[in-house]
Image (tube, rainbow, N blue to C red):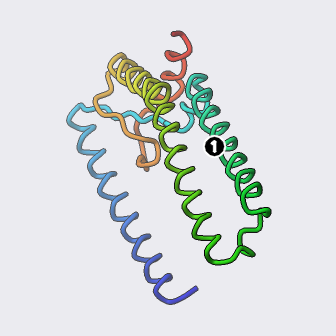
Amino acid sequence: MRWYHKVGFFLLAALVFAAGGMILRLTTSVEAEGIKIGYVDPDEILKKFQPAVDAAGRLDTLKAQREKDLRDKVVEKFGTADVDKLPREKQLELNRLIEEAEKSFEGEVDKIRQDEWDPVVGKVREMIEKVSQEAGITIVLQKEVVLYGGTDLTEDVLKELTKQ
């Protein structure tokens, strides 16, 4: 490991510990003022909430299909999947082909995101708000930023989501 990587790592670690201390002091003073802090694990929710699983599955399937289509097109057009062996002018043509495929893929992903993913995320946020209000929670954070204390609302949010 190079010296600047080590220095960067230690600076990052010091920053994380300093931020943790500030959050701990903030949490203590906030709780003293009657504000309750909760947290959720959004990754856990999205892994267990079926509409999110379905949307993510469609995105994964689309990506795999588009990669296969591109590979097939490359083999058909250039006679090989080993693009490193192509001459320079063919690699430039291949780059244009890849850029076109990426633009098309991005358009399809945006459509799935807009039609399926965004409504799922909206529903999750709505349930987080509902559960936190019912529990008297004033502030809800992501689990990753909580070092100490707080109330985990993840399972309660999942229960509410599965009810609907």
Return the x and y of residue 19 as percentages of the image width and height.
Answer: 33, 60
- Residue 1's place in the image compared with 51, above or below, is below
Left/right of residue 102 with respect to residue 141 in the rendered view: right
Is 154 or 78 nearer to us in this picture?
78
Q: Residues within 10 Å of mark 1 (few under 14, many from 20)?
A: some
Q: Choose top left, top right, bottom left or bottom right for residue 130.
A: top left
Outermost residue, top direction? 164
Identify the secondary structure beneath mark 1.
helix
User: Residue at coordinates 24% horizontally, 40% vertically from top-left?
Assistant: 30
Q: Choose top left, top right, bottom left or bottom right for residue 92.
A: bottom right
- Residue 125's place in the image compared with 39, above or below, is above
Left/right of residue 163 with respect to residue 24 in the rendered view: right
Outermost residue, bottom direction? 3
Left/right of residue 96 with respect to residue 19 in the rendered view: right
Q: Choose top left, top right, bottom left or bottom right for residue 138.
A: top left
Is 77 or 40 nearer to us in this picture?
77
User: Residue at coordinates 29% horizontally, 45% vertically from top-left?
Assistant: 28
Return the x and y of residue 35 as percentages of the image width and height.
Answer: 25, 32
Residue on which the image places disc 1: 63
Return the x and y of residue 29 as percentages of the image width and height.
Answer: 23, 44
- Please state, as top left, top right, bottom left or bottom right, where the N terminus lies in the image: bottom right
Callout 1, which amino acid?
A: Lys
User: Residue at coordinates 54% horizontally, 25% vertically from top-left?
Assistant: 155
Return the x and y of residue 7 as percentages of the image width and height.
Answer: 44, 83
User: Residue at coordinates 57% horizontally, 22% vertically from top-left?
Assistant: 51
In this rendering, the count of numbered labels is: 1
